[in-house]
Image (spheres, rainbow, N blue to C red):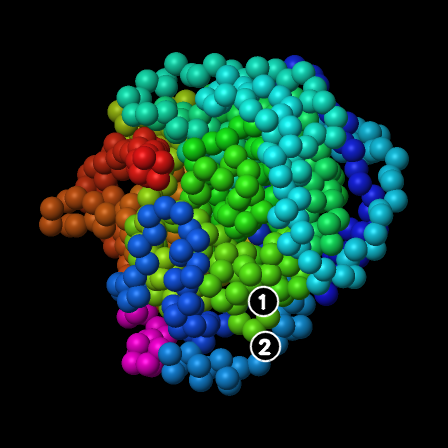
């Protein structure tokens, strides 16, 4: 049965969004809008019970998957995670001894407790609203305008929500090649042909669209050209809640320099600042069948071109009119079923058939599943798919009837090899991982870790099974946005030659702005983070009093779980003048903390890659990190004998070890400043750009499309 959302949606009529045809402009001043972070899904139980069943039957799926999947029955499992949890270790031993038995027993013993889980998942995520963005007039103006433009609503045809069980299969046959609508942009390579699927048949002729900008001058790379569609749920500067937004912006830009045509497909959320919305150009619209009972939805395409990258926004007010991209699973599941299918249908509609479809996180994970089922008879079927895991904790899990209804996917994908988990749930990320031609994640260490039970978020067996197509490629940072020499949000710009003096000035001004004691002899520790369980904040909270020695200041910037927000507020009061807790989302403040702090804390429980330690290093701020995921891959621990390294690290998830790392940093800072200063310069000198990693992605694209 579809849940509340289906009722809610069925009450709404179909919107027709008025196209904005205003001329687009390029190079807007980047400005992020801050929104709530993904609702943290209910922690799923260790799914060992499903594990072995998957291993036994997944070959069937693999057969369907084009490309070079090389599944291994018993792949190597990640390294040191094991040491960290004795309880987990015990579980692992049991499973290793007889995984089939263990899984079966556990499955038999367990009863799903969905109702409770769902209530929890529907709970509101913690707020993360940027003050400035909220205060901004253009957004208001956009809202007003949108409201004014609301078309008369047509009554929804069927009270469809009640009957999710209805067959979805008929759609597969309906999705036949139809007709072409529009010329390809200059960025697209392939000759325009007739249109493919029913979903993408234009409702009306596509309006005159501006030609896409020419290939940028930097596209000098000698490797063969490839076209890539990026599909994901957020992208700086339009909408960003964390590192995914940074990557969706920076990687396409870097790929353009690797001789790629890139189109980024995003939802057109209402919260995208008006300064961008008003520059979008209408590319067309159509009706798309979505649900199992054939219920269809409007899909509009709005385009914006910037820095050689084409951004196509999927427009539908029913799904994307919340203030934030992520609200709760009840709303988010239908939203991202729609988005995944609409993204493919839009490509078909535009007749832009990319070589590669690169999907990001669970919100885009159904794309490979749709491509190999409902779109199998379209031209898009030649494309190879990649699914990048930015954070395995978020998977898009809900009961099968709801996901089957909203996705309209055929019954056969709701099996243990693809979408099914536990007894009656479907996991959208799992399905995407099964069908994608390649899986990547954002660091090599995390690629190994997620194949272990401790970090695997119940998908470790699935990932082990698909390990032949899994690899880690570490993130970089965008050197145009993150450059202390040109960053106009800083009090003082600096580079490697004058960092030691200028950093002091940035520090003093930061202390002044935040109401801290102005004293450049104090050791300032920054923390810029979502305040969630992932980020190791319980460790920070438990040792903070021991860190506060009269010579140290702590600056926190973040939003998230209420208990962490309150804890840091409490410490601000307890250590007035030395602790400042900025419970907010504020890009400018983040930049100033990276520049003004001496060290940046990232003690994460797990960290797929982590960008804050990269930004910190580039700003000459020494990272103090836990050795996990990308933190381990990017921060070489300081070695006092060789006087080498980039930061201070600790391994096990223990407060004492974090405290020890902070104390080691302080000792170097206060007692061997010249060594510290050398590390600052070494960090600024380190190559953290996207170039190397973009090359690796390009190699992967070439491998898949050889
Ligand atoms: P995650 O994606 O898990 O949140 P990352 O380290 O990959 O972590 O990326 C976090 C990004 O979000 C960085 O660009 C960081 O500067 C930014 N960020 C996090 N919290 C805030 C905040 N409260 N205000 C401004 N920027 C923030
Ligand atoms: C996720 C991860 C983070 C990573 C980011 C971008 O949100 O938590 O570690 O850097 O995605 O890939």
Q: To which quarter of the image does residue 166 belong?
A: bottom right
Q: Which residues are magenta?
A: 82-99
Classify residue 587 as left or right of residue 676.
Answer: right
Local secondary structure at mark 1:
strand
Q: Position of residue 343 (x, y in %)?
A: 59, 38
The Cα atoms of the two marked residues, 1 and 2, are separated by 9 Å
Residue 477 versus residue 468: which sits nearer the camera?
468
Q: Is residue 140 left or right of residue 650?
A: right
Regarding mark 2 in the picture, which secondary structure is present there?
loop
Q: Are marks 1 and 2 in contact (CB under 8 Å)?
A: yes
Nearest the camera: 318 or 128?
Answer: 318
Q: Could you say which is closer to the camera, residue 629 or residue 364?
A: 364
Q: Report x, y in % for residue 643.
A: 15, 44
691 drawn magenta: no
Pick the residue in front: 68 or 141: 68
Name which residue lies at 69% across and 58% down.
167
State the mark number for residue 556. Answer: none
> Around disc 2, counting alpha carbons within 10 Å, would you say few (fewer than 14), some (14 to 19), or many (20 or more)?
few
Check disc 2 and report the residue beneath it: 112
> In this rendering, is residue 528 above or below 546?
above
Circle 1 sits on which residue?
A: 425
| x then y, percent, for residue 444 | 30, 50
Which SS type dominates the magenta stretch?
A: helix
569 is higher (above) or lower (below) than 517? below
On the rendered structure, is 73 left or right of 14? Answer: left
Residue 627 x %, y %: 30, 56
User: Neighbour class for label 1 at 10 Å: few (<14), some, many (≥20)?
Assistant: many
């Amino acid at each position: 049965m579809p849940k509340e959302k289906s009722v809610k949606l069925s009450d709404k009529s179909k919107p027709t969004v008025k196209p904005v045809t205003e001329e687009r402009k390029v190079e807007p001043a980047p400005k992020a809008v801050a929104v709530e972070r993904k609702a943290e899904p209910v922690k799923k139980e260790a799914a060992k019970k499903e594990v072995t069943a998957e291993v036994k039957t997944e070959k069937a799926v693999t057969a369907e998957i084009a490309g070079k999947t090389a599944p291994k029955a018993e792949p190597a499992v990640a390294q040191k995670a094991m040491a960290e949890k004795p309880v987990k270790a015990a579980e692992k031993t049991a499973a290793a001894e007889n995984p089939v038995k263990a899984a079966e027993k556990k499955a038999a013993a367990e009863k799903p407790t969905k109702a409770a889980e769902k209530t929890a998942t529907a709970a509101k995520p913690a707020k993360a609203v940027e003050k400035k963005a909220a205060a901004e007039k253009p957004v208001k103006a956009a809202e007003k305008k949108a409201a004014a433009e609301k078309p008369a609503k047509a009554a929804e045809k069927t009270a469809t929500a009640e009957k999710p069980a209805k067959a979805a299969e008929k759609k597969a046959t309906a999705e036949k090649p139809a007709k072409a609508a529009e010329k390809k942009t200059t960025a697209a390579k392939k000759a325009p042909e007739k249109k493919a699927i029913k979903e993408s048949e234009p409702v009306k002729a596509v309006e005159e669209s501006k030609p896409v900008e020419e290939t940028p001058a930097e596209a000098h790379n000698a490797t063969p050209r490839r076209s890539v569609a990026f599909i994901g749920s957020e992208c700086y500067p339009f909408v960003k809640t964390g590192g995914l937004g940074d990557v969706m912006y920076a990687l396409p830009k870097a790929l353009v320099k690797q001789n790629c045509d890139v189109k980024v497909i995003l939802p057109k959320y209402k919260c995208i600042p008006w300064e961008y919305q008003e520059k979008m150009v209408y590319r067309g619209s159509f009706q798309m069948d979505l649900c199992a009972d054939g219920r269809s939805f409007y899909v509009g395409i709005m385009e914006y071109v910037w820095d050689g990258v084409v951004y196509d926004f999927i427009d539908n007010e029913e799904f994307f009119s919340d203030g934030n991209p992520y609200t709760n699973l009840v709303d988010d599941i239908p939203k991202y079923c729609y988005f995944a299918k609409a993204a493919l249908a839009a490509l078909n509609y535009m007749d832009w058939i990319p070589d590669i479809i690169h999907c990001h996180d669970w919100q885009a994970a159904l794309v490979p599943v749709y491509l190999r089922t409902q779109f199998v008879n379209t031209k898009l079927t030649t494309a190879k798919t990649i699914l990048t895991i930015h954070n395995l904790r978020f998977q898009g899990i809900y009961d099968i009837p709801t996901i089957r209804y909203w996705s309209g996917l055929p019954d056969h994908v709701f099996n243990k090899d693809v979408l099914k988990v536990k007894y009656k749930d479907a996991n959208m990320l799992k399905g995407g991982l099964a069908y994608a031609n390649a899986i990547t994640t954002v660091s090599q260490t995390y690629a190994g870790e997620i194949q272990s039970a401790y970090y695997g978020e119940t998908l470790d067996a699935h990932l082990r099974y698909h390990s032949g197509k899994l690899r880690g490629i570490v993130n970089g940072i965008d050197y145009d946005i993150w450059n202390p020499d040109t960053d106009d949000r800083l009090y003082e710009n600096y580079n490697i030659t004058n960092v030691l003096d200028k950093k002091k000035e940035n520090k003093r001004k930061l202390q002044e702005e935040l109401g801290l004691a102005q004293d450049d002899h104090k050791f300032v520790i920054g923390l810029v983070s979502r305040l969630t369980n992932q980020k190791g904040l319980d460790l920070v909270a438990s040792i903070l009093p021991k860190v506060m020695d009269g010579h140290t200041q702590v600056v926190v910037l973040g939003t998230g779980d209420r208990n962490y927000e309150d804890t840091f507020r409490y410490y601000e009061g307890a250590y007035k003048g030395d602790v400042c807790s900025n419970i907010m989302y504020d890009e400018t403040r983040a930049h100033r903390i990276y520049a003004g702090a001496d060290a940046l804390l990232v003690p994460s429980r797990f960290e797929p890659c982590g960008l804050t330690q990269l930004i910190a290093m580039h700003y000459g701020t020494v990272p103090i990190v836990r050795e996990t995921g990308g933190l381990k891959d990017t921060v070489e621990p300081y070695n006092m004998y060789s006087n080498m390294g980039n930061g201070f690290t600790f391994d096990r998830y223990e407060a004492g070890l974090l405290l020890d790392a902070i104390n080691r940093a302080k000792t170097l800072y206060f007692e061997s400043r010249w060594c510290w200063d050398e590390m600052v310069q070494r960090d600024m000198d380190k190559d953290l750009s996207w170039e190397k990693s973009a090359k690796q992605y390009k190699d992967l694209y070439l491998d898949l499309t050889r």
